[in-house]
Image: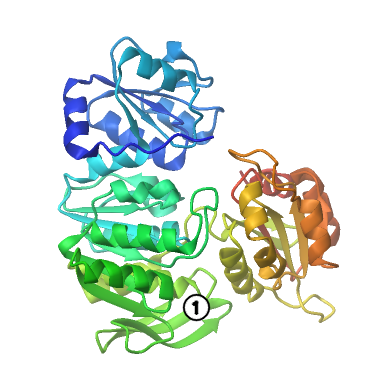
Amino acid sequence: MSVNNTHDGPLRISEYMSDARSVFFIGVGGVMMSSLALLTARAGYAVAGSDRSRTDVTEELRAEGIDIYYEHSADNLGDDCGLVVYTVAISPDNPEFVAAHQRGIPCVSRSDYLGFLMTRYRRRVGVAGMHGKSTCTSMCAQIFMDADADPTILSGAVYGPMGGAYHLGGEEHFIFEACEYMDSFLDFHPTVAILLGAELEHVDYFKDMEQIRTSFAKFASLTGPRGVTVVNLDDPEVMESARRAIKAKQTGHLVTFSIDDPKADFHAKNVSMVDGYPCFTMVAFGRVWGKVQLSVPGRFQIYNCLAAAAAADACGIDRLSVIEGLENYVGADRRMQPKGKVNGVMVYDDYGHHPTEVKATLEGAKHLCTPHEDGTPGRLICAFQPHTYSRTAQLYDQFLTAFDAADRLVLIDIYAARETDTCGVSSRLLAASIGDTAVYAPTPPAAADIILREAQPGDVIVVMGAGDVTRVTKCLLPMSL
């Protein structure tokens, strides 16, 4: 069971902060929470936090002078704690959360707190969508950094060129990943709202597509009549959300992007694959901007490029900087991230866990395979860990075809996250339903053993999922993580 978002807003949170000397973060080891903790510490507040395990992220926080606790306890809240920031994934009986309420310490959800922090920036670019948020945010980051725009960035994934999942810059541009889970993104204040795409996801919160359309329309409305909404013309769901916001006169200028429709404001033409990587000509408002050759695989990456370019243009970034930034983009962590070779076979790590993103990523990865020494085609081998029972059950039929591009699929036990097994699904059952290409492995080490027996030069290995599936990579490449 999770905890609801607060919706206190910037003014009330500003009042909390005026009286606070210390801020405590529950779940501080998360990518976004750790970024917020660091931003708060660098603003001059004493910061502490708790999480379940020691990681590279928590060690980085400790190096910045932030006290970290590896078990949740009421005693972790110091006497001078003036505000508690929490992630909604915590349980309502979390000892620190309970103690804060008992002591009258204000508690603010992560998204509400982020909404407060961003209001000091003049231009605020929020990247929303069921898939591609971290990649598009990182592409925006690269463009703005290459243009010397000194952006402040908060992403859901580590991006090497900015040294982590966040970058502290000036107060002109704020670029952030806008997570839709539990309507968290409705606490934000974008002046430019990107809508990448929408479909049924987070089924433990969103009950149907109408609820999702309504939420995305509200997000688009947050820009106000002077803002800009950048929307995927090829996705009917986000287009419907944008139309609702415009009809209500709650959002400003609409900018569209598309691969398929040349009438879009930003359009890709002459699309091709060069050694497995997308190449295209970018056209903006009827004018050719230039050729873009990406260094990340997958045709779907073009959508992220076009969205990032449109947002940068809305913020006054020049055409040449946009093209340069996209060509310099090197990929965010766990987004088809190359990790190294085992027995001459390249291993990639990917965060994909929804059937749509799994299918698109594997179709892109298939282009990276090369022939075996005997001339037979190289194979795509995927180790996948389903994330949550509810998602696996609700999207079961879509998962049956999501792995069609893979020649071998190794399915690991479902990562429960915040759930218990009440849905009657399992990875063993999914493997049996998919058929001969799929095999069940109960643990990451067992999956790695299967892969090591089968992989040969020319193949490509993709380790995929949002849980602890990275343990497979650790088994394959002990020195890589």
Q: Residue 94: x and y, percent?
A: 49, 23
Q: Residue at x 66, y 73 (%)?
A: 366
Q: Nearer the viewer, residue 479 or 7?
A: 7
Camera-side residue: 22 or 377?
A: 22
305 is higher (above) or lower (below) than 260:
above
Can residue 155 be seen in the rendering of this structure?
A: yes
Q: Nearer the viewer, residue 294 or 203?
A: 203
| Residue at 23% across, 71% down | 247
The image position of residue 444, as x and y in percent, is 74, 45
Q: Residue at x 39, y 64 (%)?
A: 213
Q: Specify the quadrant of the image occupied by residue 77.
A: top left
Indicate the quadrant containing the C terminus: top left, top right, bottom left or bottom right: top right
Q: Tell me the quarter of the picture where residue 467 sits.
A: top right
**CA neighbours of label 1 inside 10 A, class few (<14), some (14 to 19), many (20+):** many
Element type where label 1 sits in the image: strand
Residue tagged by mark 1? 278
Residue 8 screen position, x and y as percent: 25, 36
Residue type indicated by callout 1: Pro
